């Protein structure tokens, strides 16, 4: 499988100007190609092919006074800009055909967009120098903060400038099958929540860090200063960057937490089961801020790709499984319960169950994992004698949940 490794870049003043030219040229070629295809569609003309657009908008355009500055950047990033437009159209049409979730039609890029990218392939002859710098054509040698070693030779590198004004180099590498971890015995089900970020079927509970809530005071101050700046002024642009950096710190801390926890769980367990949560629906409720702060989707995606990378089993169960209603001890469905009920007693077997741990055990069982349900039980309540022993007529037991 292919993985992406991202490292921080520290370009100099001249290199930042060269990167700005590259971002601008890639954006212009993208917009010119989009305009040509939209014009052809409105006039009922054949859809222009990528090869024809490349010849017209890059090769021939460089010979004109209006687009002569396209020659100041590597031709590879201009070609990749056309490929990005092809991908955008393909995703749009696949969404209309039902092959993937629907997404909007390609839109024009603006020079005011706070996130800019350019991509270099092997044809651009970029390389990592012996001194550890990233050499890019017509840009120079960029200083890289290497936090780890690349597992293999990367095929492409994408230079990204984010909303906070930071630069990153994103490498695409092919993983090695030798990274498969040795098999272990434990299997675990995970119930994701807000009070506790994750509750495991073995009884462990991982608290939610709530990074956004902890940074709200600083964010509020930065956003208030931004709102008081005059529009289209230099001071407003500086204040916008300060807000973006504050949000970037929150996002980075959340991502680091997700990576550490997912790597730990993948290393400790042979199989992991999670519930397919309706995050979009929950994000429309009064708990929207807490749901977005938790970042469940990003965490589950990390579990999924790390399981595939390291030879683990990852299972999603349906979101309509009544994991909070079924007793993990006897399997009897005891009905829905409001959110404030954190501990409940099974009416069939009398077990007193922790709501979250019980749900995690049921997630594992629904995925077909043989896990211990001991953690789901807080304590054992007195079990009444069977009706036959008490001298009463036996009655049918409650039916098990389907």
Image (spheres, grey):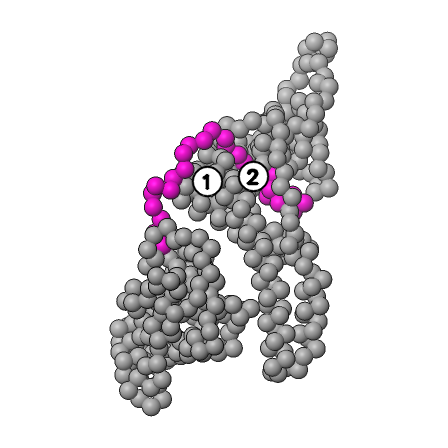
**Which residue is disc 2 drawn over?**
190
Tell me if 112 is positioned left or right of 66 in this view: right
Q: Position of residue 221 (x, y in %)?
A: 71, 68
Q: Nearer the viewer, residue 50 or 180?
A: 180
Q: Give the magenta range.
A: 173-199
Q: Nearer the viewer, residue 4 or 109?
A: 4
Q: From this viewpoint, which residue is outermost toward the front?
A: 131
Q: Position of residue 73 (x, y in %)?
A: 35, 77
Quarter residue 351 falls in: top right
Residue 266, above or below 79: above
**Residue at 41% in and 52% down:** 149
Q: Nearer the viewer, residue 100 or 228?
A: 228
Q: Which mark is residue 314?
A: 1
Mark 2 or 1, nearer chain start: 2
Q: Position of residue 150 (x, y in %)?
A: 39, 53
Quarter residue 337 falls in: top right
Q: Position of residue 95 (x, y in %)?
A: 42, 60
Where's the C terminus, which quadrant?
top right
């Amino acid at each position: 499988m292919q993985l992406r490794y991202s490292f921080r870049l520290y370009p100099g003043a001249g290199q930042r100007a060269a990167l700005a030219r590259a971002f601008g040229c890639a954006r212009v070629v993208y917009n010119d190609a989009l305009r040509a295809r939209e014009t052809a569609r409105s006039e009922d003309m054949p859809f222009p092919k990528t090869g024809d657009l490349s010849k017209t908008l890059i090769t021939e355009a460089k010979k004109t006074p209006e687009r002569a500055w396209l020659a100041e950047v590597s031709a590879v990033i201009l070609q990749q800009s056309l490929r990005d437009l092809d991908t955008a159209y393909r995703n749009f049409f696949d969404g209309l055909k039902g092959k993937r979730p629907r997404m909007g039609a390609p839109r024009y890029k603006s020079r005011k967009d706070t996130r800019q990218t350019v991509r270099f392939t092997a044809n651009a002859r970029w390389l990592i120098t012996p001194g550890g710098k990233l050499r890019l054509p017509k840009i120079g040698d960029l200083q890289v903060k290497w936090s780890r070693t690349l597992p293999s030779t990367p095929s492409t590198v994408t230079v990204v400038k984010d909303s906070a004004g930071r630069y990153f180099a994103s490498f695409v590498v092919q993983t090695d099958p030798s990274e498969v971890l040795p098999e272990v015995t434990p299997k675990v089900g995970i119930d994701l929540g807000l009070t506790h970020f994750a509750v495991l079927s073995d009884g462990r509970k991982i608290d939610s860090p709530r990074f956004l809530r902890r940074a709200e005071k600083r964010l509020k101050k930065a956003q208030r200063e931004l709102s008081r700046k005059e529009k289209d002024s230099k001071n407003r642009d500086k204040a916008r960057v300060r807000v973006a950096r504050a949000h970037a710190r929150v996002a980075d801390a959340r991502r680091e937490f997700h990576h550490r926890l997912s790597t730990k769980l993948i290393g400790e367990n042979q199989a992991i089961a999670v519930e397919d949560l309706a995050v979009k629906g929950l994000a429309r409720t009064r708990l929207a801020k807490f749901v977005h702060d938790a970042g469940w989707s990003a965490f589950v995606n990390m579990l999924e790709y790390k399981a595939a990378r390291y030879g683990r089993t990852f299972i999603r169960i349906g979101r309509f499984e009544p994991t909070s209603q079924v007793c993990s001890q006897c399997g009897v469905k005891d009905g829905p319960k409001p959110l404030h009920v954190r501990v409940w007693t099974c009416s069939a077997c009398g077990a007193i169950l922790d709501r979250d741990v019980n749900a995690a055990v049921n997630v594992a069982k629904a995925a077909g994992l043989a896990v211990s349900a001991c953690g789901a039980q807080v304590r054992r309540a007195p079990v009444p004698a069977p009706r036959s022993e008490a001298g009463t007529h036996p009655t049918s037991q409650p039916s098990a949940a389907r």
